[in-house]
Image: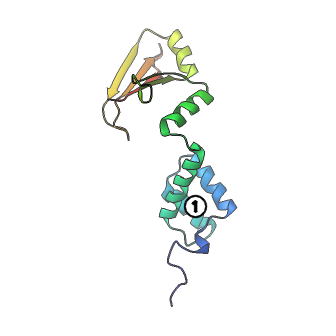
Amino acid sequence: MMLPYPSGQGPKSRLTLEEYEVVKLLRRSHVKPVLIMDRLRKDNPQTSMSVKYVYNQLEKMTKENMAGRTVIQHVMLNLQEIGYEYWYRSNEAGDTLTDLMFAAPISLKLLRLFSHVMLMDCTYKTNTYEMPLLEIVGITPVGYNFTIDVAFHVP
């Protein structure tokens, strides 16, 4: 017997509104796409969607969320919206970002209170954009660590 649509294609592979909301909720909770697909299959065993479709849907949601902005524009807008302090430098022409540094307001308060011990750690080429990452960490008198600041530099 031949199916009218190959696996993962056709009318049944489209997300219903309820499934879309489930995917959106799980995405916000940083659930892996494979587990999102597992949840969709548990909710609807008749679904013919593939994991690739879930990946594509997540990518589509990301692009919708960015609303035409570049990745760095989106990051800076999010930092501004959630109240982070951030500093940046650009090249001579002003069209390319060279450095970005940001800190949460609570981190700056903790830094003012506990500024005696700090640790700076720089990793190189370990993120998607192969940019050096500097993390500055503080330590409270009772031994708790807190991130003070994070900085990226474009080599």
Is 60 above or below relative to 84? Answer: below
* Residue that sits furthest to the right in the current view: 17
Locate residue 98 relative to residue 39 in the image: left or right: left
Residue placed most toward the observer, 27 or 9 = 9
Could you say which quadrant of the image residue 11 lies in? bottom right
Is 61 above or below relative to 128? Answer: below
Q: Residue at x 58, y 70 (%)?
A: 13
- Whole-percent x, y for residue 134 in the image: 38, 25
Is 136 above or below relative to 15? Answer: above
Residue 19 in view of the camera = yes
Q: Residue type at mark 1: give it.
A: Arg
- Whole-percent x, y for residue 75 in the image: 52, 34
Residue placed most toward the observer, 117 or 30 = 30
Q: Residue at x 53, y 20 (%)?
A: 107
Could you say which quadrant of the image residue 90 lies in? top left
* Residue that sits furthest to the front in the current view: 93
10 Å crowding of disc 1: few (<14), some (14-19), many (20+): some
Residue placed most toward the observer, 143 or 80 = 80
Locate residue 84 relative to residue 135 in the image: left or right: right
Quadrant containing the C terminus is top left
Q: Residue at x 62, y 69 (%)?
A: 44
Residue placed most toward the observer, 47 or 118 = 47
> Tell me, what colour scheme is on the image?
rainbow
Is 61 above or below relative to 120? Answer: below
Tell me how many marks there are.
1
Residue 46 in view of the camera = no
- Dot 1: element: helix
- Whole-percent x, y for residue 34 in the image: 49, 59
- Whole-percent x, y for residue 43 in the image: 63, 65
Residue placed under numbered mark 1 in the picture: 39
